[in-house]
Amino acid sequence: KFGIETTTVDATDNAAWEAAIRPNTKVFFFETPANPTMDVADMAAICVIAKAHGITSVIDNAFATPALQRPMEFGADVVAYSATKMMDGQGRVLAGAICGTREWITNTLLPFHRNTGPTLSAFNAWVVLKGLETLDLRIRRQSENALKVAKFLESRVAKVLYPGLESHPQHALAMRQMEMAGPIFSLYVGGGRAEAHGLLNGLQLVDISNNIGDSRSLMTHPASTTHFGMAEAARLEVGITEDMLRLNVGLEDADDVIADLDQALRTIGR
Ligand SMILES: *Cc1c(COP(=O)(O)O)cnc(C)c1O
């Protein structure tokens, strides 16, 4: 409808960004860590390629938030947030934020914004502002908890995808870009949908929910919920398999979350 054409690239392959540039390429858009594959993109390298070609780089920083990762320090032009997630932090409102230079906001964003109307209600804005006051504390504790839970799960499931673990292929890059690895990660239970849904159904403390960034631990099955709209072949190409689950680790005692996952894993024979 807006006449926008897109090319998909593997965000972890810096050369792929350069190779995908066409005469009409205006924007590079990516998230890091990515939802739900937890791929980490090299912000500095990709933004250098963008600048050399007069391309605007837009980074979705929802998973890390500005408390843990500040993309403009790595050359990003525009940074976008789902404030619905960590910034609210308690699953109360839908909200978002877009950050850029005053010139970009005035000349590029505002004309579109004014004519299309995505305006946050005053109450939602107030809730997010209250959330921001505790964002730094919450995300650091949730990141500590996530690391403990991820380490536990590594010994019990087929694979854990968390940039905070040394087993993550881009662990070193992630730790150069992020102060901590954040509250969210994904895992492959092993098996298929039956095992993934079995684990979810066995949970007693962790809630089944598609939200992330909440101060309560939440787990979801991306293939049948958040990424259900993608064609199956496209899902499999990026690693969203039937046995994949995404976990947001909250502010509960990490040992309680581990105990819940432990008993739920036992219900599926792990
Ligand atoms: C949830 C999410 C969005 C969309 O945000 P909404 O607040 O649900 O509109 C965009 N990017 C990432 C990485 C997200 O996790």
Image (spheres, rainbow, N blue to C red):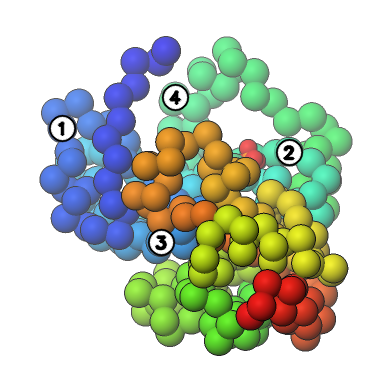
Compute the Cα span from label 2 to label 1.
35 Å
Relative to 223, residue 154 above or below: below
Q: Earlier in the sequence, mark 2 or mark 3?
A: 3
Relative to 57, residue 252 above or below: below
How many marks overall? 4
Q: Helix or strand or loop: what does disc 4 sit on? A: helix
Residue named by callout 2 = 94
Compute the Cα span from label 2 to label 3.
25 Å
Residue named by callout 1 = 22
Residue named by callout 4 = 107
Residue named by callout 3 = 39
For marks 1 and 4, give the one nearer the viewer. Answer: 1
Q: Helix or strand or loop: what does disc 2 sit on? A: loop
Q: Earlier in the sequence, mark 3 or mark 1?
A: 1
Of the four image quadrants, the one with ligand 1 is top right
Compute the Cα span from label 3 to label 4.
32 Å
Compute the Cα span from label 3 to label 1.
24 Å
Compute the Cα span from label 2 to label 4.
26 Å
Front in this rendered view, residue 197 or 11:
197
Circles 2 and 4: CB distance less than 8 Å? no
